[in-house]
Amino acid sequence: MMNKAKLKLSLLQMDIKIGEPEANYRKAEQMLHAAVSADPKPDVIVLPEMWNTGYALEQIGDLADENGESTQERLSAFAREHQVSIVGGSIAEKREAGVYNTIHAFGRSGEELGQYDKIHLFRLMDEEKHLQPGSRTGTLSIDGMPAGMMICYDIRFPELARKLALSGAKMLFVPAEWPNPRLHHWRTLLQARAIENQMYVIACNRCGQSGETVFFGHSMVIDPWGEVIAESGDQEGILTAEIDPGLVDEVRTRIPVFEDRRPLLYE
Protein backbone atom coordinates (compact mmCIF):
# COMPACT_ATOMS: atom_id res chain seq x y z
CA MET A 1 0.00 0.00 0.00
CA MET A 2 1.42 3.37 -0.97
CA ASN A 3 2.50 5.74 1.77
CA LYS A 4 0.44 8.94 1.47
CA ALA A 5 2.80 11.07 3.61
CA LYS A 6 4.43 14.00 1.89
CA LEU A 7 8.09 13.64 0.87
CA LYS A 8 10.70 16.32 1.53
CA LEU A 9 13.37 16.58 -1.17
CA SER A 10 16.85 18.10 -1.31
CA LEU A 11 18.55 18.48 -4.71
CA LEU A 12 22.32 19.01 -4.61
CA GLN A 13 23.19 21.43 -7.43
CA MET A 14 26.98 20.94 -7.60
CA ASP A 15 29.82 22.56 -9.46
CA ILE A 16 31.76 19.51 -10.63
CA LYS A 17 35.55 19.50 -11.08
CA ILE A 18 36.28 17.73 -14.36
CA GLY A 19 38.63 14.78 -13.98
CA GLU A 20 39.00 15.13 -10.17
CA PRO A 21 36.99 12.35 -8.51
CA GLU A 22 38.34 12.83 -4.98
CA ALA A 23 37.57 16.56 -5.00
CA ASN A 24 34.05 15.75 -6.21
CA TYR A 25 33.54 13.10 -3.54
CA ARG A 26 34.57 15.65 -0.90
CA LYS A 27 32.17 18.26 -2.31
CA ALA A 28 29.31 15.74 -2.47
CA GLU A 29 29.97 14.69 1.13
CA GLN A 30 29.92 18.33 2.30
CA MET A 31 26.63 18.95 0.53
CA LEU A 32 25.10 15.71 1.79
CA HIS A 33 25.92 16.71 5.37
CA ALA A 34 24.51 20.19 4.79
CA ALA A 35 21.29 18.66 3.45
CA VAL A 36 20.68 16.36 6.44
CA SER A 37 21.53 19.19 8.85
CA ALA A 38 18.55 21.20 7.61
CA ASP A 39 15.31 21.48 9.54
CA PRO A 40 13.22 19.74 8.41
CA LYS A 41 15.57 16.98 7.30
CA PRO A 42 14.87 15.65 3.80
CA ASP A 43 13.40 12.25 3.08
CA VAL A 44 15.19 12.05 -0.28
CA ILE A 45 18.46 13.58 -1.53
CA VAL A 46 19.25 13.79 -5.26
CA LEU A 47 22.63 14.40 -6.96
CA PRO A 48 23.42 15.50 -10.56
CA GLU A 49 24.79 13.52 -13.51
CA MET A 50 28.41 12.26 -13.71
CA TRP A 51 29.27 14.05 -10.49
CA ASN A 52 32.27 11.88 -9.71
CA THR A 53 34.31 12.72 -12.83
CA GLY A 54 32.45 15.27 -14.95
CA TYR A 55 32.78 14.86 -18.70
CA ALA A 56 36.47 13.95 -18.72
CA LEU A 57 35.67 11.41 -21.42
CA GLU A 58 39.17 11.12 -22.90
CA GLN A 59 40.39 9.79 -19.52
CA ILE A 60 37.16 8.20 -18.37
CA GLY A 61 38.50 4.65 -18.39
CA ASP A 62 41.12 5.62 -15.81
CA LEU A 63 38.85 7.86 -13.74
CA ALA A 64 35.63 5.85 -13.57
CA ASP A 65 34.66 4.09 -10.34
CA GLU A 66 35.47 0.36 -10.65
CA ASN A 67 32.10 -1.42 -10.61
CA GLY A 68 30.73 1.63 -8.80
CA GLU A 69 32.07 0.14 -5.57
CA SER A 70 33.47 3.27 -3.93
CA THR A 71 30.37 5.34 -4.70
CA GLN A 72 27.94 2.66 -3.59
CA GLU A 73 29.82 2.11 -0.33
CA ARG A 74 29.85 5.83 0.50
CA LEU A 75 26.23 6.57 -0.43
CA SER A 76 24.87 3.43 1.21
CA ALA A 77 26.72 4.16 4.45
CA PHE A 78 25.50 7.77 4.47
CA ALA A 79 21.90 6.75 3.80
CA ARG A 80 22.02 4.20 6.62
CA GLU A 81 23.69 6.55 9.11
CA HIS A 82 21.27 9.42 8.48
CA GLN A 83 18.12 7.40 7.70
CA VAL A 84 17.60 9.17 4.37
CA SER A 85 16.99 7.87 0.83
CA ILE A 86 19.51 8.91 -1.84
CA VAL A 87 19.07 8.97 -5.61
CA GLY A 88 22.78 9.13 -6.24
CA GLY A 89 22.81 11.22 -9.39
CA SER A 90 24.88 9.31 -11.90
CA ILE A 91 28.53 8.34 -11.96
CA ALA A 92 31.06 7.09 -14.47
CA GLU A 93 31.22 3.39 -13.62
CA LYS A 94 33.79 1.01 -15.11
CA ARG A 95 32.83 -2.61 -15.77
CA GLU A 96 34.22 -5.43 -17.86
CA ALA A 97 32.19 -4.30 -20.91
CA GLY A 98 33.26 -0.65 -20.61
CA VAL A 99 32.24 2.54 -18.83
CA TYR A 100 28.60 3.32 -18.09
CA ASN A 101 26.75 6.43 -16.94
CA THR A 102 24.95 4.91 -13.95
CA ILE A 103 22.52 5.87 -11.19
CA HIS A 104 22.55 4.01 -7.86
CA ALA A 105 19.72 4.70 -5.42
CA PHE A 106 19.63 3.73 -1.73
CA GLY A 107 16.97 3.55 0.94
CA ARG A 108 16.96 4.66 4.56
CA SER A 109 18.65 1.45 5.75
CA GLY A 110 21.39 1.69 3.13
CA GLU A 111 19.80 -0.95 0.91
CA GLU A 112 20.01 -0.48 -2.87
CA LEU A 113 16.62 0.55 -4.24
CA GLY A 114 17.52 0.57 -7.92
CA GLN A 115 20.14 1.04 -10.61
CA TYR A 116 19.94 2.57 -14.07
CA ASP A 117 22.43 2.94 -16.93
CA LYS A 118 21.79 5.86 -19.29
CA ILE A 119 20.11 4.47 -22.40
CA HIS A 120 20.49 7.40 -24.82
CA LEU A 121 24.06 8.60 -25.30
CA PHE A 122 24.51 12.25 -26.30
CA ARG A 123 26.49 12.60 -29.51
CA LEU A 124 27.07 16.34 -29.06
CA MET A 125 29.31 15.51 -26.08
CA ASP A 126 30.82 12.36 -27.71
CA GLU A 127 29.28 10.05 -25.13
CA GLU A 128 28.81 7.29 -27.68
CA LYS A 129 32.58 7.22 -28.33
CA HIS A 130 33.50 6.58 -24.71
CA LEU A 131 30.49 5.11 -22.89
CA GLN A 132 28.32 2.03 -23.19
CA PRO A 133 24.53 2.46 -23.47
CA GLY A 134 22.17 0.92 -20.95
CA SER A 135 19.77 -1.81 -22.03
CA ARG A 136 16.93 -1.62 -19.51
CA THR A 137 14.71 0.93 -17.83
CA GLY A 138 15.22 2.04 -14.24
CA THR A 139 12.52 1.83 -11.57
CA LEU A 140 12.47 2.00 -7.80
CA SER A 141 10.16 2.71 -4.87
CA ILE A 142 10.83 5.31 -2.16
CA ASP A 143 8.74 5.18 1.01
CA GLY A 144 6.11 3.25 -0.93
CA MET A 145 5.98 5.69 -3.86
CA PRO A 146 6.96 4.13 -7.24
CA ALA A 147 9.40 6.11 -9.35
CA GLY A 148 11.42 6.02 -12.53
CA MET A 149 14.92 7.18 -13.44
CA MET A 150 16.19 8.94 -16.55
CA ILE A 151 19.45 10.81 -17.20
CA CYS A 152 19.76 14.16 -18.99
CA TYR A 153 19.43 13.50 -22.77
CA ASP A 154 16.86 10.77 -21.98
CA ILE A 155 14.20 13.44 -21.44
CA ARG A 156 14.13 14.09 -25.20
CA PHE A 157 12.59 10.61 -25.61
CA PRO A 158 8.96 10.72 -24.42
CA GLU A 159 8.51 7.00 -25.05
CA LEU A 160 10.83 6.20 -22.16
CA ALA A 161 9.01 8.45 -19.69
CA ARG A 162 5.66 7.01 -20.79
CA LYS A 163 6.92 3.45 -20.34
CA LEU A 164 8.01 4.31 -16.80
CA ALA A 165 4.62 5.89 -16.07
CA LEU A 166 2.81 2.83 -17.43
CA SER A 167 4.94 0.65 -15.16
CA GLY A 168 3.55 2.62 -12.20
CA ALA A 169 5.99 5.50 -11.71
CA LYS A 170 4.55 8.57 -9.97
CA MET A 171 7.89 10.36 -9.67
CA LEU A 172 10.63 10.75 -12.28
CA PHE A 173 14.19 11.47 -11.14
CA VAL A 174 16.42 13.19 -13.71
CA PRO A 175 20.10 13.84 -12.87
CA ALA A 176 21.70 15.98 -15.57
CA GLU A 177 24.63 17.97 -16.92
CA TRP A 178 22.48 20.12 -19.21
CA PRO A 179 24.48 23.05 -20.62
CA ASN A 180 23.91 26.55 -21.91
CA PRO A 181 22.25 27.80 -24.01
CA ARG A 182 19.38 25.29 -23.94
CA LEU A 183 17.55 26.38 -20.77
CA HIS A 184 14.27 26.70 -22.69
CA HIS A 185 14.59 23.09 -23.89
CA TRP A 186 15.43 21.91 -20.35
CA ARG A 187 12.41 23.53 -18.73
CA THR A 188 9.97 22.75 -21.55
CA LEU A 189 10.90 19.09 -21.86
CA LEU A 190 10.76 18.51 -18.12
CA GLN A 191 7.35 20.18 -17.87
CA ALA A 192 6.10 18.17 -20.84
CA ARG A 193 7.19 14.89 -19.25
CA ALA A 194 5.34 15.89 -16.06
CA ILE A 195 2.15 17.01 -17.83
CA GLU A 196 1.79 14.14 -20.28
CA ASN A 197 2.52 11.49 -17.63
CA GLN A 198 0.81 13.28 -14.73
CA MET A 199 3.70 12.69 -12.36
CA TYR A 200 6.31 14.61 -10.40
CA VAL A 201 9.57 15.36 -12.19
CA ILE A 202 12.59 15.92 -9.95
CA ALA A 203 15.52 17.18 -12.03
CA CYS A 204 18.95 17.90 -10.54
CA ASN A 205 21.34 19.70 -12.90
CA ARG A 206 24.95 20.68 -12.32
CA CYS A 207 26.23 24.25 -12.40
CA GLY A 208 29.61 25.84 -13.09
CA GLN A 209 31.91 25.49 -16.08
CA SER A 210 34.05 22.72 -17.61
CA GLY A 211 36.39 23.96 -20.32
CA GLU A 212 34.28 26.04 -22.70
CA THR A 213 30.99 24.53 -21.55
CA VAL A 214 28.84 26.45 -19.06
CA PHE A 215 26.15 24.65 -17.05
CA PHE A 216 23.26 26.80 -15.93
CA GLY A 217 21.90 24.81 -13.00
CA HIS A 218 18.16 25.51 -12.71
CA SER A 219 17.46 22.25 -10.94
CA MET A 220 13.72 22.02 -10.48
CA VAL A 221 10.78 20.09 -9.07
CA ILE A 222 7.63 19.99 -11.20
CA ASP A 223 4.23 18.75 -10.05
CA PRO A 224 1.80 16.51 -12.02
CA TRP A 225 0.02 19.59 -13.41
CA GLY A 226 3.32 20.75 -14.94
CA GLU A 227 3.78 23.60 -12.43
CA VAL A 228 7.33 24.34 -11.30
CA ILE A 229 7.08 24.26 -7.51
CA ALA A 230 10.80 24.83 -6.81
CA GLU A 231 13.70 25.97 -8.99
CA SER A 232 17.35 26.89 -8.40
CA GLY A 233 19.29 29.69 -10.03
CA ASP A 234 22.69 29.18 -11.66
CA GLN A 235 24.81 28.94 -8.49
CA GLU A 236 25.82 25.97 -6.37
CA GLY A 237 23.39 25.16 -3.59
CA ILE A 238 20.66 22.90 -2.24
CA LEU A 239 17.13 23.13 -3.63
CA THR A 240 14.39 21.91 -1.29
CA ALA A 241 10.78 21.04 -2.00
CA GLU A 242 7.92 18.97 -0.61
CA ILE A 243 5.76 16.73 -2.76
CA ASP A 244 2.38 15.14 -2.11
CA PRO A 245 1.95 11.59 -3.48
CA GLY A 246 -1.82 12.00 -3.32
CA LEU A 247 -1.73 14.76 -5.95
CA VAL A 248 -0.69 12.26 -8.63
CA ASP A 249 -3.80 10.18 -8.05
CA GLU A 250 -5.97 13.30 -8.02
CA VAL A 251 -4.63 14.58 -11.34
CA ARG A 252 -4.91 11.19 -13.02
CA THR A 253 -8.51 10.90 -11.87
CA ARG A 254 -9.50 14.37 -13.05
CA ILE A 255 -7.97 13.97 -16.53
CA PRO A 256 -7.94 10.21 -17.23
CA VAL A 257 -5.16 10.19 -19.82
CA PHE A 258 -4.12 6.62 -19.15
CA GLU A 259 -7.65 5.29 -19.45
CA ASP A 260 -8.16 7.17 -22.72
CA ARG A 261 -5.04 5.90 -24.45
CA ARG A 262 -5.49 3.92 -27.72
CA PRO A 263 -2.10 2.20 -27.96
CA LEU A 264 -3.07 -0.08 -30.87
CA LEU A 265 -3.28 3.02 -33.08
CA TYR A 266 0.17 4.23 -32.03
CA GLU A 267 2.10 1.19 -33.15
Image (cartoon, helix red, strand yellow):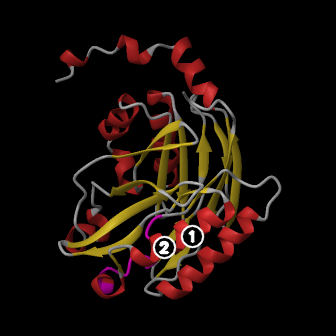
Quadrant that contains the N terminus: top right
Cα separation between marks 1 and 2: 6 Å
Q: Could you say which is closer to the camera, residue 5 or residue 191?
A: 5
Circle 1 — which element? helix
Region of the chain picked out in magenta, as a range:
49-59
Q: Main secondary structure of the magenta part?
A: loop
Q: Residue at x 52, y 54 (%)?
A: 183
Circle 2 — which element? helix
Circles 1 and 2, Cβ within 8 Å, touching? The answer is: yes
Q: Picture coordinates of residue 189 (x, y %)?
A: 45, 42
Q: Which residue is mark 2?
A: 73
Q: In which image quadrant can residue 229 be found?
A: top right
Q: Mark 1 belongs to which amino acid?
A: Ala
Q: Is residue 120 above or below residue 142?
A: below
Q: Which residue is mark 1?
A: 77
**Residue 51 lies within the magenta run:** yes
Q: Mark 2 belongs to which amino acid?
A: Glu
Q: Is residue 29 above or below residue 158?
A: below
Q: Is residue 17 above or below residue 223?
A: below
Residue 51 seen by the camera: no
Q: In which image quadrant can residue 226 be found?
A: top right
Q: Picture coordinates of residue 137 (x, y %)?
A: 31, 46
Label 1 neighbourhood size at 10 Å, few (<14), some (14-19), many (20+)?
Answer: some
